[in-house]
Amino acid sequence: MGARQSIRPVLHAGAQKLIDANVHDGVIDSLGQVDRDVVELRALIGDSQIGL
C-alpha cells in the first residue's frame, strides 16, 4: 500500500479527491483559507497526454 492510500481513510471527502488527481507538472495559482474549515487550492495540473 502506498503512502497516499494509507491516509485515505482519515481524509474528508473533498481531500480524498486530491489523492487521485494527476498533479504532474502542477503549477499552483492560489492557496488560501476561505472559511474556518475550508482551504481552497487552485492549480493548473496534468500534462499534454492527459490534458490540463
Image (cartoon, helix red, strand yellow):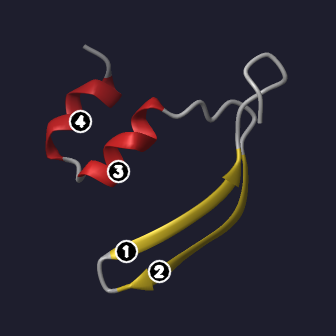
Vertical order, 16 against 37 (above or below) = above
Circle number at residue 7: none
As helix, strand or loop, the secondary structure at mark 2 comes to strand
At which x and y percent is residue 8? 23, 36
As helix, strand or loop, the secondary structure at mark 1 comes to strand
Circle nearer the N terminus (1, 4): 4
Vertical order, 6 against 9 (above or below) = above
At which x and y percent is residue 28? 70, 57
Residue type at numbered disc 2: Gln
Vertical order, 46 against 42 (above or below) = above
Q: Circle 3 is placed at which residue position?
A: 15
Rendered image quadrant of residue 41: bottom right
Residue sitting farthest toward the front:
51
Circle nearer the N terminus (4, 2): 4
Local crowd at mark 4 within 10 Å, few (<14), some, or many (≥20)?
A: some
Residue type at numbered disc 4: Arg
Circle nearer the N terminus (3, 1): 3
At which x and y percent is residue 17? 39, 41
Q: Which residue sits at x=21%, y=28%?
A: 6
Circle number at residue 33: 2
